[in-house]
Image (spheres, grey):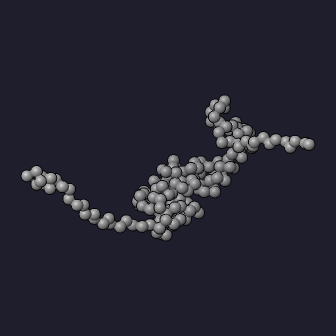
Amino acid sequence: MAEQKTEEKAKPEHTHKPKPEEKKYDEKLIRILSKDIEGGLNVYVGLTKIKGISWSLSNAICKSLNLDKKRKISSLTPAEINKINDFVKNPNIPSFLLNRKSDFETGEDKHLIGSNLELQKEMDIGRLKKIKSYKGLRHSIGLPLRGQRTRSHFRRNKRKSVGIKKKAVKK
């Protein structure tokens, strides 16, 4: 009787079911808005790799173009990539999602990406330096702008010091 109980308690052999084949995406680079993005990333995450596209704007792009946020970028069709390019160049979204509200020169709301954003930022800093505003002076000296203390901690990663070299001994 004890032998029967142990036989009943013996674990049945596991039969491994073959896993369904997952979709294999090409791990290639996809070019969106002159930026190479890894094909293995989700659309939501991949769009944020473009300079000038934040998480909230990436979410707005996915919702307005009816793209699945979890979909891999490598699975996008060329037509969908063109839609993304056109949408970012002419966004039809609320102005609070744009990165250049009431532009200094034109007064209009617009969204800049990539090298245009970097150039505009440099021009803004140059304008502040030229008119010698407080922020411009702080930029030129290399100090923090927004009221942070300067006794410590603002120097982090500012300049790398060069080690002292010993002078050659004359003989």
Question: Which of the pair 70/56 is nearer the observer?
Answer: 70
Residue 124 location (% of width, % of height): 67, 47
Is residue 171 visible in the rendered structure shown here? yes
Q: Nearer the viewer, residue 126 or 103?
A: 126
Q: Residue at x 66, y 30 (%)?
A: 151
The outermost residue toward the right is 171
Q: Residue at x 54, y 55 (%)?
A: 49
Left or right side of 86 for 136: right
Q: Is residue 18 left or right of residue 124?
A: left
Tell me the residue at 58%/54% (across/down).
51
Relative vertical location of residue 171 with respect to residue 91 in this rendering, above or below: above
Q: Is residue 92 visible?
A: no
| Number of marks | 0
Given residues 115 and 83, the one toward you in this image is 115
Spot occupied by residue 146 in the image (x, y as percentages of width and height) = 62, 36
Q: Residue 74, relative to residue 94: is it above or below?
A: below
Look at the image and tell me in which quarter the C terminus lies.
top right
Q: Quadrant of the rendered structure where residue 143 is?
A: top right
Q: Foreground: 124 or 158?
A: 158
Furthest-bottom residue in this view: 78
- Could you tell me which residue is drawn at 24 percent across and 61 percent down? 14
The answer to whether residue 34 is above or below residue 141 is below
- Specify the quadrant of the image occupied by residue 150: top right
| Left or right position of 91 against 1 | right
The location of residue 165, given as percent across then percent down, is: 80, 42
